[in-house]
Image: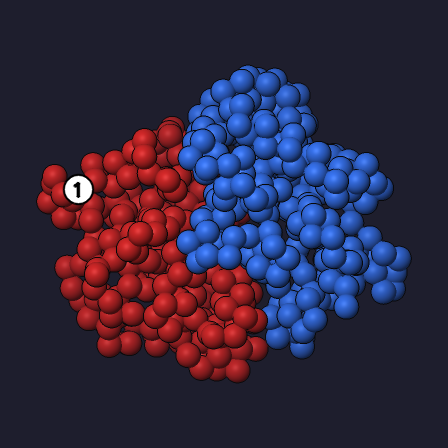
Chain colours: A blue, B red
Amino acid sequence: MAYELYYWPTLQGRGEFVRLALEEAGVPYHDVARLPEPKGGAPAMLALMGGDTVPHPPFAPPFLKAGRLLIGQTANILLFLGDHHGLAPNTEGGRLWVHQVQLTIADLVTEAHDTHHPIGASLYYEEQKAEAARRAADFRKTRMKKFYGWFETVLERSGGNFVGGRRATYADLSLFQVVEGLRWAFPKTARKVEKTTPRLVALHDAVAARPRIAAYLASERRLAFNETGIFRRYEELDG
Amino acid sequence: MAYELYYWPTLQGRGEFVRLALEEAGVPYHDVARLPEPKGGAPAMLALMGGDTVPHPPFAPPFLKAGRLLIGQTANILLFLGDHHGLAPNTEGGRLWVHQVQLTIADLVTEAHDTHHPIGASLYYEEQKAEAARRAADFRKTRMKKFYGWFETVLERSGGNFVGGRRATYADLSLFQVVEGLRWAFPKTARKVEKTTPRLVALHDAVAARPRIAAYLASERRLAFNETGIFRRYEELDG
């Protein structure tokens, strides 16, 4: 039985963290909203969110259908996939640690999103450009460095090249995606900050070179970054 | 062996979600930063965050020391406590669902925080008042209703009075705290929105009446809301 991933069909966004885990796990899945209607498409996704009889309706995409389970919240989906597909340690302490790192990545992702939407997700970027300029400046000057510095420390102390030690976990795949995304959104800032985080850059490269990830990135399944996702390239926000 | 909770000593903040779970579990714990120095106080907390030899340094408080484990990220700490103290279902699907609700609560908590700090946590509220007014307006008009509406739907379909059905979980304790916090921060808005969410209000009251929670709320261990936490009362932000 193939998993069913539900996420917006035309952007990487938070769904990409799940796609990377599914690809690395090498399990069959349908990216439902990218399939043709009526079985696929965004309407199929919205039906599950708004359906009157869904016992566990997700608040927002992405969510994953795994047999009878419908699992929402990116980090929660990854917790599930990590346990089922060897993408997390087996020990309680190891599992919690990898999840802790993932939740910290989630915080950074929200902050990266809010650089272009500091006032509200229901407004266009153009309606909050002035506020975005201020928030992006704070992100460039304090927040991104703080998160990257912490990731570097985590890798320094892990006893291996990955967050949990010698084996790649879902949090490592997500770190790869964060580095990619912030290189896209803040190329100048990323170039500077990455000079101080060699281990994080090495992890990014190691993940990109994993056979299943490399095949995925070269495929049509990998969407390009664009100005509708989490990571957006607005030159004026890169300082 | 008592747990050690590490959080800012003078505010509820994110630490309060953990305090409520520890109190409901009825387990011994030290709220370390509220103990006298040198063993306690904020320095004891900061030492664990900045120490050179801490293998799993937390990015930010709260974090919990449980024997040899040091666990950070509020929802992750609750995942641990839920498993160990009967504050989460035993089934995989039930555990994931409660965690999913908790992570959605965490998103709301971040948005509530950002109503007074839309530009940056390193700046004072007074330095971002204009932006806060705009963000708070969006929060009042769209976001709070959307989250509360979802919580109400969750409770409608749970088969009981709580998120996971008939037994209270850590996510229910957190919902109590969100209702308390938003009543404090946005009294006028909360009064209006709560008219549409009778199940959420009933859950709040049921949690408040649980013997261990009631005893905790009446004790000196429960700090008052104030203008340094997540939920802050600035009259001008309540519309």
The residue sitting at 85% across, 56% down in the picture is A35
- On the image, the x and y values in percent for residue A211 come to 75, 40
Amino acid found under the numbered disc labelled 1: Gly
The answer to whether A44 is drawn above or below residue A9 in the figure is: below
Quadrant the N terminus of chain A occupies: bottom right
Residue B133 in sight here = no
* Residue nearer the viewer, B128 or B3: B3
- On the image, the x and y values in percent for residue A116 come to 60, 33
- On the image, the x and y values in percent for residue A77 come to 60, 57
The residue sitting at 53% across, 61% down in the picture is B100
Q: Is residue B128 left or right of residue A37?
A: left
* Residue nearer the viewer, A83 or A230: A83
Quadrant the C terminus of chain A occupies: top right
Q: Is residue B8 left or right of residue B87?
A: left
Q: Quadrant of residue B127?
A: top left
The residue sitting at 77% across, 64% down in the picture is A2
- On the image, the x and y values in percent for residue B189 come to 43, 57
- SS assignment at label 1: helix
Residue A94 in sight here = yes
The answer to whether A169 is drawn above or below residue B96 in the figure is: above
The chain ID associated with circle 1 is: B
The residue sitting at 74% across, 57% down in the picture is A27
Q: Is residue A175 left or right of residue B81?
A: right
Q: Quadrant of residue B45?
A: top left
The mark tally for this picture is 1
The answer to whether A47 is drawn above or below residue B59 in the figure is: below
Mark 1 Cα within 10 Å, few/some/many (few <14, many 20+)?
some
* Residue nearer the viewer, B139 or B189: B139
Q: Quadrant of residue B146?
A: bottom right
Residue highlighted by disc 1: B41
